[in-house]
Image (tube, grey):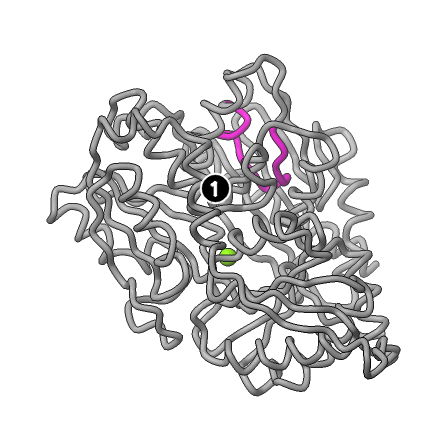
Amino acid sequence: MGRLFGTNGVRGRINDEMTPELALRLARAVGTVLGPGEIAISRDSRRGGTMLTNAVRSGLLSTGCSVVDIGPSPTPTLQFMIPRLNCVGGIMITASHNPPEFNGIKVMGADGIEVSREVESSIEDVYFNSSFRKADWAEIGSTRNYDRAIEQYISAIESHVDAEAIHKRSLTVVVDGANSVGSLVTPILMRELGCTVISLNSQLDGAFPGRNPEPTPENIVHLAEVVRSTGADLGIAHDGDADRATFVDENGRILWGDQSFAIVASRVLARKSGSTLVTPVSSGRLIEDVARNAGAKIDWTVVGSVVVSHRLKETGAELGGEENGGVFYPPHQPVRDGAMTAAQIVEIMSVENKSLSEIVNELPQYYSTKIKVSVPSEIKTRLLEPLLELTKDNERITIDGIKLIYKDGWVLLRPSGTEPLWRCFAEGKTQEAADRLCEKGKKLIEEAIRMSNS
Ligand code: MG
């Protein structure tokens, strides 16, 4: 049986792999598995969004599901609305941070969280077996539009922060919406919180003329320049579907994802003693330090935002996060939410009356190194066994690859999901320590390859 879903939904080149036919069949499968009932849909600004939405709508209706279209919006806006509209699920047309020629489909359950691997498998079974539910002529679903989603979502975020303190501080914020749906939310949210807003790339355009939709440091250099030249207090950059936010301080310094995550985590976890933070094993020392200082426990998961969301829902933990800057704040909703994270950062700056650079400078400093080690495809998955044997005396976490923990840092060894290689990611108190640990990881992988070949 083939697979459709990757780490976050189904992705492909528009009209190449990501065709109306695929969207139609996938929606028929989703309606079959999640229906009967109403399914909420939305899309980002990408090309092909309307084409795919129409196919998805037809597919859902044919299974007897009804459709509520909330219009273009961020993924977390759709996720927020699904349970509030009493829908049995949701479909988001987006390829998140991928290049402009891609589009994709994310599928959410009734709780607004992207469906688990098990539900994805059921959807794939129906898709590949063509065992779609076919509604009787008299049971074809209906469609309606709902146009208050963004307004309700913004009000909810405002209710979770100290709006009065933010108003008093009256910050100047530059928002870079990546020519996509983050522009429909964050500039309005910030203005309503009393900030002066300068908008960049705020017209929706699927060609992404302003910048690449992934908010990496290379892609948001212009935002950093605008923050500095306008004397603004901070910059906020979203990815294509605004479930993530990257921040720039008043000096134009771009924060790493784990830094903004750590800033939010240190405050949220300290509110209650014995809090729990859910985070993948790829998260680093900074997060561990922040959790320890706040007296919180860490609940490690395998890598992937969907796993973090489901774990948060199961355990009722206080916060989730990823080193790429994804922050999950369950009192709002247990999914990555770029606008919620942005509101939390301006809240912290306002309540503590500090600049963003002062807040960042309070964080401990760590250094990292990443390398790839080529491994022949035929032994890639078999490498774990010799690696476990080679490292059996080390302090380690083995829930996803192997994370080896040393006094001066750690190194994580994981096979790539798609390429014939293993990744080696190390972090240390100095650059030299990180490089040394990465080298140690590489030697272990090479030794394991020799053991597998002999
Ligand atoms: Mg995204």
Percent coordinates x, y for residue 206 in the rendering: 40, 75
Q: Going by the image, does 204 lie left or right of 145?
A: left
Q: Going by the image, does 119 lie left or right of 150?
A: right
Instruction: Answer with the quarter of the image where residue 129 lies.
Output: bottom right
Which residue is under mark 1?
435
Amino acid type at mark 1: Asp
253 or 388: nearer the eye? 253
Q: Residue at x 84, y 58 (%)?
A: 454
56 or 310: nearer the eye? 56
**Span colored in magenta:** 277-289
Q: Residue at x 73, y 57 (%)?
A: 88
Instruction: Answer with the quarter of the image where residue 90 lies.
Output: bottom right
Q: Residue furthest front?
A: 138
Percent coordinates x, y for residue 112 in the rendering: 65, 51
Up the image or down, 76 lies above or below 363; here it is: below
Percent coordinates x, y for residue 419 in the rendering: 64, 67
Q: Residue at x 51, y 53 (%)?
A: 77
Q: Going by the image, does 7 lie left or right of 314?
A: left
84 or 23: nearer the eye? 84
Residue 390 counted in the magenta span = no
Numbered-mark total: 1
Residue 280 counted in the magenta span = yes
Q: Residue at x 63, y 30 (%)?
A: 405
Up the image or down, 118 lies above or below 270; here it is: below
Q: Quadrant of the N terminus?
A: bottom right
Q: Secondary structure at mark 1?
A: helix
Percent coordinates x, y for residue 104 in the rendering: 58, 71
